[in-house]
Amino acid sequence: MNRERYLQEIDAVNAAGKYHPTWESLSTHPVPEWYREKRLGIFLHWGVFSVPAYHDWYARNMYIKGSPEYEYHCQHYGQPKDFGFKDFIPQFKMEAFDPQAWVKLFREAGADYIVPVAEHHDGFQNYRSELSHWNAAEMGPHRDIMGDLLVEAERAGMTLGASSHRVEHWWFLGHGQEFDSDIKQPMHLGDYAWPAMPERENHDLFSEPMPTDEFLTDWLLRCCEIVDRYHPRILYFDWWIQHSAVKPYLQRFAAYYFNVMESRGGCVINYKHDAFPFGIGVPDIERGQFAEAKPFLWQSDTSVMRGSWCYSVQPDKAVYKAPQEIVQDLLDVVSKNGRLLLNFGPKPDGTLADKDVEILRKLADWMRVNDECIHGTGLWRINQEGPTKIQEGQFADGASRNFTSEDFRFTCRGGNIYAACMACPADGKLHIRSLREADASHLPLWHGIVRKVEVLGNPAQAAWTRDGEALHVDLGAYRSDMPVVVRIITD
């Protein structure tokens, strides 16, 4: 590819387009209406890191002497100077990859958008690229795995996305230069480990050495190539794009993305750490949520495993969340105007782990009954009740929240209120206090008329009463190990 010509094309599009590379101009880009309808997305951390099956930061940590990953690597693969991270690439074969089967599972689980990792911090592209030879079409699988997956996802009606974690590559492999390894100078643009700079305090917005124009121009071109080749309607950025040096390139990219996708129904950027001024794109909380409902759209991204984003066989990393907890997260996020981007880590042979499939099928079973309280719903005037409080912020999902039968999350649709009981009570008795009856001397937040109460998935007619304490619903013989949803028909 002629890089200089591509840059000129990018700048020409921005000069002629509706959006220009300034925050003022970019702030006029609206969140498309179709995004407001999204509720559940599938995130896929696949790549070379799935071969050692440790965790997604293995490429960095295996070059830190004394780290558990370094010791593990030396024991199983030899010294990094003899067998470096790039030497895993031939083992990343994806020979059993069946994108149609994957998408079928995702759709049955209720997912309506998909965000595969295009490039992670390690620098290997999971798509066909003209900017680097270190990509899945030329090495490893010898197949455009992201492109093939997105084709099937589009056929199934899913909204297409992609994620870029490239910018952290500036320092991600830098520790490999601290001792005798396969990462050594001289390195140049096009080399796999380039630039492998020293890692500083990586949340310092002004850390040095600052990324160079050469590196950030390459980053810009890679992002634009993803847009031009696959036209993802959602582009998710991991952290570190908030670094001060990245800002001008981020503006150029966002303008290009918005302009290119303007005639294709619009697009959305997900970002973290205030990388964009508020009002541009949709903020994302990694492994966390908001404590209360928000008037703006937001996203929570989390993984089905607590200790890894990618496929792992390490006992302390491959700790799976229970399907019940995942549904509880979904209910909590949706009730607060959010979307849940749920991550799975495929195996290097192109299959999904048995536990991943089990979770997807359990989600499908629940969604088959309860989808109407998720998709097509909006915020109700009260979003939650009960004693269990969510810790607000990122990296707060390390332990289960231990919801009780007194915890509810609410949505509404078509005049109906949906009350999801986060943990089915052993005695089958639900008490929804936000829907209690009241007289004019003590009006609650809601004072409507309840015409009928139904328990989704329960073929028997639910017995219910309403008094000054709560709306009381008797599940009868119906029990579930998953959240139970009550449809309240109002007048």
Image (tube, grey):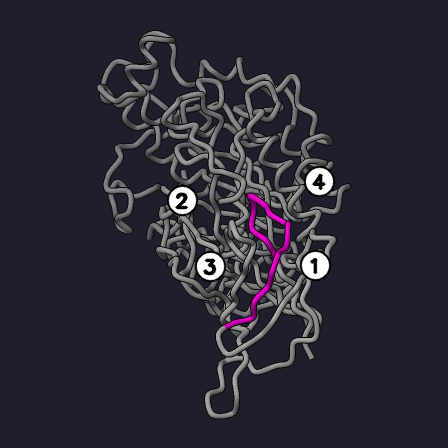
Label of residue 407 in the image: 3
The magenta segment = 470-485
Label of residue 400 in the image: 2
CA separation in Å, label 1 and label 4? 17 Å
CA separation in Å, label 3 and label 2? 14 Å
Query: Regarding mark 1 in the picture, which secondary structure is present there?
Result: loop
Q: Amino acid at mark 1?
A: Gly
Q: Image point 58% across, 35% down: which residue?
A: 359
Mark 3 or 2, nearer chain start = 2
Label of residue 153 in the image: 4
Q: Is residue 340 left or right of residue 182?
A: right
User: In the rendering, at what x and y percent does residue 162 appear?
Assistant: 58, 42
Label of residue 317 in the image: none
Query: Regarding mark 2 in the picture, which secondary structure is present there?
Result: loop
Question: In the displayed image of the protein, which residue is found farthest to the right?
Answer: 155
User: In the rendering, at what x and y percent does residue 293 appear?
Assistant: 47, 66
Residue 68 part of the magenta segment: no
